[in-house]
């Protein structure tokens, strides 16, 4: 292997939004994540809507029932 081309492999702390901390090793010292195995719906069995960048609201706005509007009448030109 060539020397001085590989990144340093250091102890890393991964912090979840729920407050869970996981210690491991990585090339980065600190990592922040939104979901981990303690709060992810697949592992907990509880349903939780995971919204990233407002996608749930965007979906609801796009596919919600809109009020029916009357079409505009065209003016006759003589």
Image (cartoon, rainbow, N blue to C red):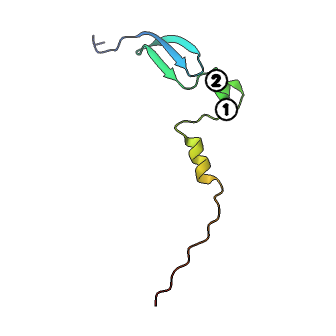
Q: Position of residue 70 (x, y in %)?
A: 61, 70
Q: Position of residue 28 (x, y in %)?
A: 41, 16
- Residue farthest along the right direction in this orientation: 45
* 60 or 1: nearer the viewer: 60
Q: Which residue is mark 2?
A: 39
Mark 1 vs 2: CB contact within 8 A: yes
For numbered disc 1, what is the local secondary structure?
Answer: loop
Q: Position of residue 27 (x, y in %)?
A: 40, 15
* In-image side of 8 versus 50 (left or right): left
Badge 2 crowding class, 10 Å Cα cut-off, few under 14, some 14 to 19, many 20 or more, is some
- Number of the label disc, if any, that sits on residue 48: 1
* Residue 69 occupies quadrant: bottom right
Q: Residue at x 69, y 24 (%)?
A: 44
* In-image side of 46 versus 18 (left or right): right
Q: Eyeballing the image, is 75 above or below 78?
A: above
Badge 1 crowding class, 10 Å Cα cut-off, few under 14, some 14 to 19, many 20 or more, is few
Number of numbered discs overlaid on the protein picture: 2
- Number of the label disc, if any, that sits on residue 59: none
Q: Residue at x 64, y 53 (%)?
A: 64
Q: State the separation of the CA atoms marked 1 and 2.
A: 9 Å
* Residue 41 occupies quadrant: top right
Q: Position of residue 20 (x, y in %)?
A: 59, 16
For numbered disc 2, what is the local secondary structure?
Answer: loop
């Amino acid at each position: 292997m060539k020397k001085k081309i590989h990144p340093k492999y250091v102890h890393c702390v991964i912090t979840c939004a729920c407050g869970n901390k996981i210690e491991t090793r990585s090339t980065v010292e600190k990592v922040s994540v939104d979901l981990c195995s303690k709060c992810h719906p697949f592992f907990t069995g509880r349903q939780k809507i995971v919204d990233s960048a407002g996608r749930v609201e965007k979906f609801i706005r796009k596919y919600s029932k809109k009020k029916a509007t009357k079409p505009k009448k065209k003016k006759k030109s003589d």
